Amino acid sequence: MTQSPDIPSALSDAQAALKDGRFDAGLLAAQSALQAEPENTEALYLAAVAARYVRRFVDAEAYLASLIALSPEYGRAWQEQAHLARAKGEDARALADYSRACRYNPALEASWRAQAELLSLAGRSGEAAGAQAQADKLRAMPRELIAASNHLHEGRPLRAEELCRHYLRRNPRDVEGMRLLAEIGRRLGILDDAEFLLESALAFAPDDAALRLDYVQVLRARQKYARAREEAEKLYERDPANPLFQSHLAIESMQTGDFDRAFELFDAVLEKLPSDPATLTSRGHALKTCGRQDEAVASYRAALRASPAHGDTWYALANLKTYCFTDDEIAAMRQQVERPDLAFMDRVHILFALAKAEEDRKDHAEAFRLYEEGNRLKHRQSGYSADRMSEELHRQAEVCTPALFEKHSGHGHDAPDPIFIVGLPRAGSTLLEQILASHSMVDGTLELPDILALAHRLRGRKAGENLYPQVLHDLTTEQLEKMGRGYIDSTRIHRQGAPFFIDKMPNNFRHVGLIHLILPNAKIIDARRAPMDCCFSGFKQLFAEGQEFTYGLTEIGRYYADYVDLMDHWDNVLPGRVLRVQHEDVLDDLEGQVRRMLDYLGLPFEDGCLDFHRTDRAVRTASSEQVRRPINRSGQGAWKPFEPWLGELKDALGALV
């Protein structure tokens, strides 16, 4: 809803009134803002606070219920709900809500302090001491860093970055400031900055375990798995019996392909914590990646026996694609979804899993209702804008002209090694990767983030700055060669020694121009699938991260249409540069399409590419179980039973339908 001009002044009046202790006036001002914009989160928060102070508890609860429905991970909302519960004498509920507040925003000193008090009253002295230590740590931190942390956890990362950088200019060796700025960078996707900051901070505080754990996680996000494992080993060597360190080393061992070590460490954790759902679930993921599906299912089920609310585990079962839920499991999921206190992401995971279960049972109306609800929650959380994405993709077509490519002809790094598979997720790219990685001269890797990270750096570092893709016109021959060489060097860690390797990050279709400029000899394959099949499959998928355009029928339809337009543009300005492979053609004529791809790549035909399902390699995408079976048409036309509810998707796709 468009913001009315009087809302900012009403909110300012409410804040001033609460600060002065005029709670009735504050409530009236907040209510005035809500009349103009009923879903204004700040107005709901201020109204709840004011209503609690004037002891209108029912009204306060109603405001908080609306606020939490809109922003389920807003820490201050849960803190206020805890304050309300405590005012009503409901200490157990208050303790749970304070704990949740700190999970979503660990910079809430009042929530840590209140937890310490309530835990002490309950005789839980050890936990009370831990909560008090957190409160004391926050109290000792500079106010600027507290403010930056609050901005970060309340969804304002750019403001948090501004405050943190200002603080570090005056305190360049402050480890907490560096750690916070690294976390901001991680959330903004500026992972190279985050890595550098944490590396620098560790030089000042090498014994800080929490700092090193952050460093491990950033290295993993950058897919520097060998380095991440080295750092996890350092923590493990410090205290080999620590389950947290064992768990991190297990995960990093798994990422580097040392599954025997990973399972050994997971088992060591489970000896101490036999019912830890996170460890049982991670172990299940490792078993799934190795193709040991029955054992993975057993591990997931053990996790759910320990914690039926663990949404990640329910979705892991659904994401096997070939798993069918029992009636008892469906009933258990429904019981969890009905809980008002179910955590946000647990709810989202279970909604998607339950939708898959109902789809398997052919209750398509109920399945669609559940898919739609899960997508609605994720879309609200992500803040994705189809208009902004359309503008970004249109800008690529405007800037990347024949003149640009003619100007830079013959530049870049001449390595022929990379094979980029681009397109949309759920379009068959994992199948193409599995086929090509079955060739003796091709390594399969991962969805590598390197091109996306390079594009992000080219945008510029100042808040609101966006130099990319226009900056492509200004790059020198030396810069283009350095960027191409840097890509080859940074991705070497994922290779096993074959002369060619695959980067199957689907979103790289947005950056075909950049790829061509820095790696003119790289090959690019566009994995395309029929629009309704592709879009509806994406709508049904809950992605680990990114791909926010999938969480709405209109959004995914528009994205597909924009993708087709941009790929048409690349065909026009870079004729013959991209090989388009239609998923349906692969299903109809596997050998013909395999030979076509190998001819494009300049590789000899090998029978192993036809027996791709026999290739023994770790597959980490949602299609892992599907590509371990011979070619099949199980996903074709899966949207048709849902057609009565797909009008928005058809409208967004337009003539492409």
Image (tube, grey):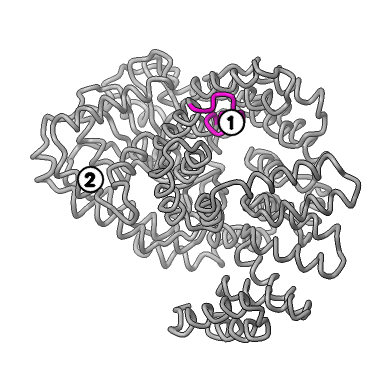
Under circle 1, the secondary element is: helix
Question: Is 535 covered by the magenta stretch?
Answer: no
The residue at 34%/18% (across/down) is 605
Rendered location of residue 508, percent (x, y) = 35, 41
Under circle 2, the secondary element is: helix
Magenta-drawn stretch, dominant element (helix, strand or loop):
helix
Question: Where 20 sits versus 150, above or below?
Answer: below
Q: What's drawn in magenta, residue-wise?
A: 204-216
169, 254: nearer the viewer: 169
367, 384: nearer the viewer: 384
Instruction: Give the residue type at disc 1.
Output: Leu
Dot 1, how many residues are within 10 Å of its Cα: few (below 14), some (14-19), or many (20+)? some
Question: Is 207 covered by the magenta stretch?
Answer: yes
Rendered location of residue 261, percent (x, y) = 65, 15
Question: Where 342 sits versus 433, above or below?
Answer: below
Q: Is residue 360 visible?
A: no
**Circle 1 sits on which residue?**
213
**Circle 2 sits on which residue?**
570
Question: Where 305 sits versus 657, above or below?
Answer: above
Q: Earlier in the sequence, mark 2 or mark 1?
A: 1
Position of the C terminus, as image quadrant, is: bottom left
Dot 2, how many residues are within 10 Å of its Cα: few (below 14), some (14-19), or many (20+)? many
Mark 2, mark 1: which one is toward the viewer? Answer: 1
Instruction: Give the residue type at disc 2.
Output: Trp
The residue at 41%/46% (across/down) is 424
Rendered location of residue 43, percent (x, y) = 58, 76
Q: Alpha-carbon distance for marks 2 and 1?
A: 42 Å
Question: Where 493 sits versus 307, above or below?
Answer: above
